[in-house]
């Protein structure tokens, strides 16, 4: 009997999926406790105020990126959530990487400057992060890339190539820089940032758009709508077609609440956990295979940093422990390594972090027509 049908049969008899009455089921109780714990963690992280130290780190990273573009003499715009943050001259939430935008006509100049600086460029959606050549950057369908800065912190930023013209170009021409940390920072026009966030439709995009929409002038709201209409963008949410942004945000508020309840249900969290451990085991296979070709402990460390394009400080700490496990005497088998990895992940509450990522990335609406370039 299919799993779904067997569960329906149990529900019809008043029993839970474990074959017990819910009030006395230990498994149900544990699942409910875990769901509440994960939900509480996600809520606290989303409401957590940025520490002065983290704000300082992001400011330092942005400053270094802007210095690079200044030296290369390339006009650059801070885009994405960071661009919305600095509208009021301060960081409002954490940004793991920065979204920077330049015009496509400067792509060759950017590539040359990036190579001189020792940066590496890769496809933003390529899981292997293979290096991009000048041909890849100059390709007509290349609209973005991931820039690996190659420092000890493993800093990265996304570079977006703009093919703007007409009304959109006018928005850039009219945009005024903002003062931040003692310098002027060009921001991508807020209408353009919102246009891209509305196209993505993730929960974090909804939160960003909802926060800023009411602060816009009537003209800015109209210009955002014009960009969407010109591109033929229509939205589907809750089984309905929507074009007006204000109506979309109202519908998304309801959709957000409904999907929130489903997300923190035991079944959805179980699927997330299963997927995370499947991915972990696959990564263990990759790392163990690499170790078999590297005899020296330091070479292994260097090769891992190269494979994953620089390592954040916490990743370096994990790698130190991992190296001790793999190069133990006698050496660990693949099964022993996988067992260690699973225990290590459990101890580090990685599942909570994964749930947070999946939650903010969940789609609340979809785009029914693609942009015509």
Image: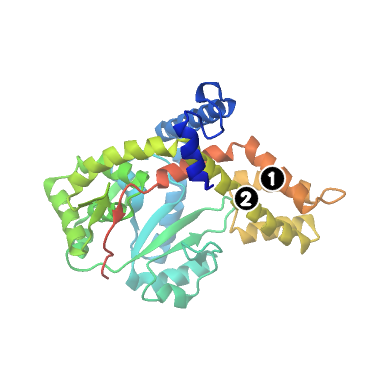
Q: Which residue is mark 1?
A: 341
Left or right side of 182 for 233 = left
Q: Residues within 10 Å of mark 2 (few under 14, many from 20)?
A: some
**x, y percentage for residue 358?**
46, 45
Looking at the picture, does residue 327 appear above or below residue 111? above
Kindly tell me whether residue 323 is visible in this rendering: no
Residue 280 numbered tag: 2
Pointers 2 and 1 in contact (CB under 8 A)?
Answer: yes
Residue at x-position 38% and y-position 57%: 100
Q: Secondary structure at mark 2?
A: helix
- Identify the residue at the far bottom of this view: 135
Residue 20 to residue 190: above or below: above
Residue 224: x and y in percent read 19, 54
CA distance for labels 2 and 1: 8 Å
Query: Which of 79 and 262 lies nearest the eye of the viewer?
Result: 262
Within the image, what quadrant is residue 59 found in?
Answer: top left
Residue 4 is tagged as: none
Q: Is residue 243 visible?
A: yes
């Amino acid at each position: 009997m299919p799993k779904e049908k067997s569960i329906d049969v149990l529900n019809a008899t008043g029993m839970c999926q474990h074959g017990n009455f819910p009030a006395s089921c230990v498994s149900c109780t544990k699942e409910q406790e875990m769901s509440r714990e994960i939900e509480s963690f996600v809520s606290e992280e989303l409401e957590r105020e940025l520490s002065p130290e983290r704000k300082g780190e992001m400011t330092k990273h942005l400053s270094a990126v802007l210095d690079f573009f200044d030296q290369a003499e390339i006009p650059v715009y801070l885009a994405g959530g960071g661009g919305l943050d600095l509208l009021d001259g301060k960081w409002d939430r954490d940004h793991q990487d920065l979204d920077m935008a330049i015009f496509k006509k400067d792509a060759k100049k950017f590539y040359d400057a990036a190579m001189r600086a020792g940066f590496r460029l890769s496809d933003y959606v390529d899981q292997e992060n293979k290096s991009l050549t000048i041909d890849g950057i100059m390709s007509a369908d290349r609209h973005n890339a991931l820039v690996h800065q190659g420092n000890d912190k493993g800093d990265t930023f996304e570079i977006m190539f703009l093919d703007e013209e007409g009304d959109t170009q006018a928005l850039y021409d009219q945009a005024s820089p903002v003062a931040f940390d003692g310098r002027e920072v060009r921001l991508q026009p807020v209408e353009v940032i919102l246009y891209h966030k509305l196209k993505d439709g993730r929960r974090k995009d909804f939160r960003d758009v909802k926060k800023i929409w009411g602060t816009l002038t009537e003209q800015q709201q109209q210009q955002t709508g014009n960009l969407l209409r010109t591109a033929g963008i229509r939205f589907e949410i809750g089984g309905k077609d929507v074009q007006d942004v204000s109506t979309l945000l109202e519908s998304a508020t309801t959709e957000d609440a409904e999907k929130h309840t489903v997300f923190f249900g035991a079944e959805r969290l179980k699927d997330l956990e299963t997927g995370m451990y499947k991915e972990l085991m696959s990564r263990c296979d990759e790392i163990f295979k690499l170790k078999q070709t590297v005899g020296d402990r330091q070479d292994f460390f260097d090769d891992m940093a190269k494979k994953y394009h620089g390592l954040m400080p916490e990743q370096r700490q994990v790698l130190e422990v991992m190296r001790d496990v793999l190069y133990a005497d006698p050496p660990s088998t693949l099964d022993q390594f996988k067992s260690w990895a699973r225990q290590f992940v459990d101890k580090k509450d990685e599942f909570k972090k994964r749930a947070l990522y999946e939650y903010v990335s969940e789609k609340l609406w979809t785009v029914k027509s693609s942009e015509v370039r």
